[in-house]
Image (cartoon, coloured by chain):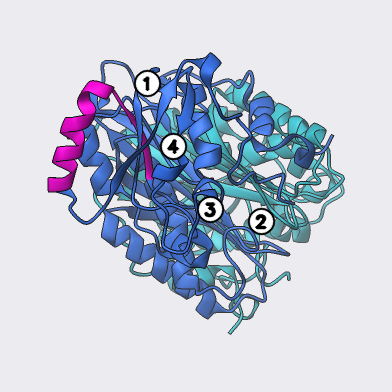
Chain colours: A blue, B cyan
Amino acid sequence: MKLSDIGEDAVVEALTRELPVGKDVIVGPGDDCAVLGKKSDASWLLLKTDAVIEGVHFLADDEPERVGWKALCRAISDIAAMGGVPGHAVITLGVPGSTELEWARGLYAGLRRAAKRFGVGIVGGETCRSPAAKFVNVSLTGSVVPSRCVLRSGGKAGDFIYVTGRLGGSLRGKHLDFTPRLVEARWLAENHKPAAMMDLSDGLGADLPRLAAASGCGHEIWPMSLPCTPGSTPLNAMNDGEDFELLLAIRPDRAEALERDWKRGFPELELTRIGQLTKPARRSTRRSAGGFDHFRQD
Amino acid sequence: MKLSDIGEDAVVEALTRELPVGKDVIVGPGDDCAVLGKKSDASWLLLKTDAVIEGVHFLADDEPERVGWKALCRAISDIAAMGGVPGHAVITLGVPGSTELEWARGLYAGLRRAAKRFGVGIVGGETCRSPAAKFVNVSLTGSVVPSRCVLRSGGKAGDFIYVTGRLGGSLRGKHLDFTPRLVEARWLAENHKPAAMMDLSDGLGADLPRLAAASGCGHEIWPMSLPCTPGSTPLNAMNDGEDFELLLAIRPDRAEALERDWKRGFPELELTRIGQLTKPARRSTRRSAGGFDHFRQD
């Protein structure tokens, strides 16, 4: 059986079963980041790893500086989605020996620019030969105050679902230049702590079912309410992926205050109510309804 | 200018210049691991990232369980070389969609086996499509008591240089089945703290000049003293790479006690005196004298 026969979520499910997670683990596989520490600690360590691969996440002729920006900002987006603050990154660069030094320099210029913008330290890495495609793996630490740590699993039936910004059309360029919602996520965790939150990397159609499943809920989406990037349709918003916006669930009695305060705090960034978590039986969208699946696209 | 024209060390030098390392960094790029924390902390966080790539670090028909073992043990070896204890790992698996699920399961069986053996928790990761070659990136945390943290940079002219085990011939199988010297490195850090230490990943001919340079020293190797794997020559010991033995420098007045206690503690593993750190002017081997260079082999 090939990975493309069963799809990404089933592959991950098969591989992460019965992993030895060790001690001092608050959250193991299955959320945006691992959360490490003891329950009583004043701060928990977040840990994330993520790769961008030539031909999948970027193209050979994309500007290397934008590839570097994207590589680090993807991981920052995951730290943000936990309510955390990014700390230190280590980089693995795998490239053919025929790669121009200028390309690698450009990549690092993008990594440095993102690191400076979001307060990340780049403290090491590995550079090795990859015979075929280039790839860049970023591993990033972060920290989060336990009371502000937001998981995927805290949603309840009846919670309203929101997204930041606009969705769809990422491949027209946004996927290389997006702004991880670090400031917004910290504001949320401090002021209107979501019941559940994650970042949208594979598209709403793939990611919302993951958040709902982690919360033991079903979900419904109101397609006409989806905030679409100009030129994109609700179908793009569901399936294109790489939006790197926040997806969050809020208790219904807190929705009004959130919407009011958000408009004051972030007048230039939309926060849109797009649906609701439901009881599991009522869920209207199957887990594999859409979004980017790494193995089914081969 | 291509990376293959200038070689791995010069590439790393060019890319890591002027990196924003951030705060709370004890050791940044250039040692086996990054060391994070404040000077006054009771324990420091170690952070390492490392990849194995098909066609470079393993072959398409190598047993996936051995590939998984190798992928995690390489990172454990780096944590060991700092005098540390490994903590939690996150895994990036990049594979074509045509990959058999059995291969991925085998890989994870090897990762699990190494994790259980050396007390590592596997707490998350990413699984994504890599169109051409497979790769596995491991990011590993660790911890070290500050007084036991051993860097590459603490050597002085006159220190004796030792290696554990035997060198060379790794490609005949050892590179997939090696035992990271975690127990031995902890014993050293606690009982006979080396002035400098690193693990041998690219071969003595590449790695010893790195340790010597980090310590501001030259070095001399006594070729006839090199402990060679049966069937290997001193040239293999210098150049093959992937030995994953410890390379350490010890002050001359501590060498006798170390050798005596080592024989008692590890009667089945050799510890061999193979050379000496020297003043920079006297160094007998150029930095690029041998060993595995990722970009020059293309």
Observer-nearest residue: B209 or A212?
A212
Residue span colored magenta: A246-264
Are the residues under marks 1 and 4 on the same chain? yes
Q: At numbered mark 3, what does the secondary structure look like: helix, strand or loop?
A: helix
What's the magenta bit mostly, secondary-structure-wise? Answer: helix
| Amino acid type at image mark 3 | Asn
* Residue A220 picture location, percent across and down: 47, 29
Cα–Cα gap, marks 2 and 1: 50 Å
Residue B243 higher or lower than A134, as above or below: above
Sequence-first tag of 3 and 1: 1
Confirm whether the magenta stretch covers residue B160: no
Q: Tell me which amino acid carries mark 2.
A: Gly
Describe residue A283's horizontal placement relative to residue B67 as left or right.
left
Q: CA distance from mark 3 to mark 4?
A: 14 Å
Are callouts 3 and 1 both on one chain? yes
User: Which residue was labeled with disc 1?
Assistant: A154
Residue drawn at x 64%, y 26% as measured from the top left: A13
Q: Residue furthest front?
A: A224
**Mark 3 in CB contact with mark 1 (< 8 angstroms):** no
| Callout 2: chain | B
Determine crowd level at label 2: few under 14, some 14-19, many 20+ residues with C-alpha closer than 10 A: many
Marks 2/4 in contact by CB < 8 Å: the verdict is: no
Indicate which disc residue B203 carries: 2
Please identify, in this view, whether the residue under mark 1 or under mark 4 is nearer the observer: 4
Q: Mark 4 — on which chain does it sit?
A: A
What's the residue type where badge 1 is placed?
Gly
Callout 1: chain: A
Nearer to me, B268 or B200: B200
- Relative to A131, B252 lies left or right: left
The residue at which mark 3 appears reads as A236
Q: Residues within 10 Å of mark 1 (few under 14, many from 20)?
A: some
Q: Are marks 2 and 1 in contact (CB under 8 Å)?
A: no
